[in-house]
Amino acid sequence: MRVLLQRVRQAHVSVDDQVCGRIGPGLLLLVGIEDADTKADLVWMAGKVARLRVFEDDAGVMNRSLLDTGGEALAVSQFTLYGSYNKGNRPSWGRAARGDVSQPLFDAFVTTLGEVLGKPVPTGVFGADMQVALINDGPVTLMLDSRQPE
């Protein structure tokens, strides 16, 4: 499981010019699922996202998490995080899980993260053509991978 995490002042996702998920200060999460992912991956990822200290404390040091700040999270499914561009110039999506595999795991991740945070996590529309707008704060952008936990 991969999550491209961006600290934002605000973010929203739209489908057909209709906003379907919106947050204020917090984290925008672009979430990719591969076939090998399990519930253990999504539980680890939800805990890491909720506890990752990427928000500044009173001294200006990134020492606070979503749990500490009460910030929000917006999750958007993004199969292209598993794109491979090793052969030629057209990416291959072979490592990305098919929708029938990835959607239940994505939904479970969103539910688990919401339980950890104690609040709902808005999302886009799985499999839809989405437009994501954000104001990146910092900027702070990190790639998390459950196969390479650091």
Image (tube, rainbow, N blue to C red):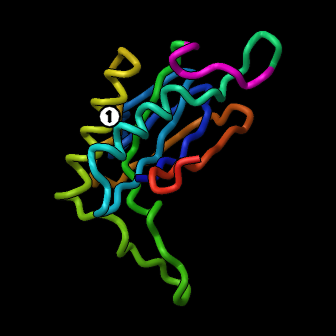
Q: Position of residue 1 (x, y in %)?
A: 40, 53
Q: Which residues are magenta?
A: 61-69
Viewer-proximal residue, 43 or 91?
43
Which residue is drawn at the image coordinates 24% and 64% (left, top)? 98
Residue behind mark 1? 110
Tell me where residue 9 sits by quadrant.
top right
Residue 42 % position (x, y): 35, 42
Mark 1, residues whose alpha carbon is within 10 Å: few (<14), some, or many (≥20)? many
**In the displayed structure, does residue 1 sit left or right of residue 112?**
right
Residue farthest toward the top in the current orientation of the protein? 58
Residue 126: percent from left, percent from top: 27, 48
Residue 67 placement (x, y as % from top left) = 51, 17
* 93 lies above or below 2: below
- Considering the numbered disc 1 on the image, is that residue within a helix, a strand or a loop? helix
Residue 99 is drawn in which quadrant?
Answer: bottom left
Please state if 60 lies on the left or on the right of 147 as rendered: right
Residue at position x 52%, y 55% from top?
148
Q: Nearer the viewer, residue 6 or 35?
A: 35
Please, which residue is most extreme toward the bottom here?
88
